[in-house]
Amino acid sequence: MPTSMNLSLTDELREFVNSRAGDGGLYSTPSEYLRDLIRRDMETQGVVRHVKEGLADIKAGRFSDKSILDIADED
């Protein structure tokens, strides 16, 4: 169930958000724009987490000398 959240923006940020929504904008409403930004940030954080896990694997010696194409051909 959707809930409301209030936030304070500077005039400059408010104008920018409003320019992205409504007539001529990519989004129907400011809320739609902000929800999309949050979803994208969540996706980015997921990618960052996977990269960090991969780096930890490399540091621990868990890696392969095979190329991604070699690995794909094994299936």
Image (cartoon, helix red, strand yellow):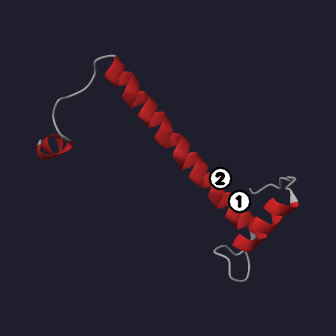
| Rendered image quadrant of residue 52 | top left
Under tag 1, what secondary structure?
helix
- Residue drawn where x is 33% and y is 16% of the image: 60
Left or right of residue 59, residue 30 in this image? right
Cα separation, mark 1 vs mark 2, equals 6 Å
| Rendered image quadrant of residue 12 | bottom right
Pointer 1 with pointer 2, Cβ within 8 A: yes
Left or right of residue 9, residue 38 in this image? left
Under tag 2, what secondary structure?
helix
On screen, residue 26 above or below 40: below
Residue type indicated by callout 2: Ile
Residue 10 in percent (x, y) is at 86, 56
Residue type indicated by callout 1: Leu
- Residue drawn where x is 13% and y is 42% of the image: 70
Left or right of residue 22, residue 57 in this image? left
Is residue 75 in sight in this rendering? no
On screen, residue 34 above or below 26: above
On screen, residue 27 above or below 35: below
Look at mark 1 in the image and give the residue it sits on. Answer: 34
- Residue drawn where x is 85% and y is 55% of the image: 9
Left or right of residue 53, residue 29 in this image? right
| Rendered image quadrant of residue 32 | bottom right
Residue 5 in percent (x, y) is at 83, 53
Residue 38's disc number: 2
Q: Residues within 10 Å of mark 2 (few under 14, many from 20)?
A: few
Residue that sits furthest to the bottom in the current view:
23
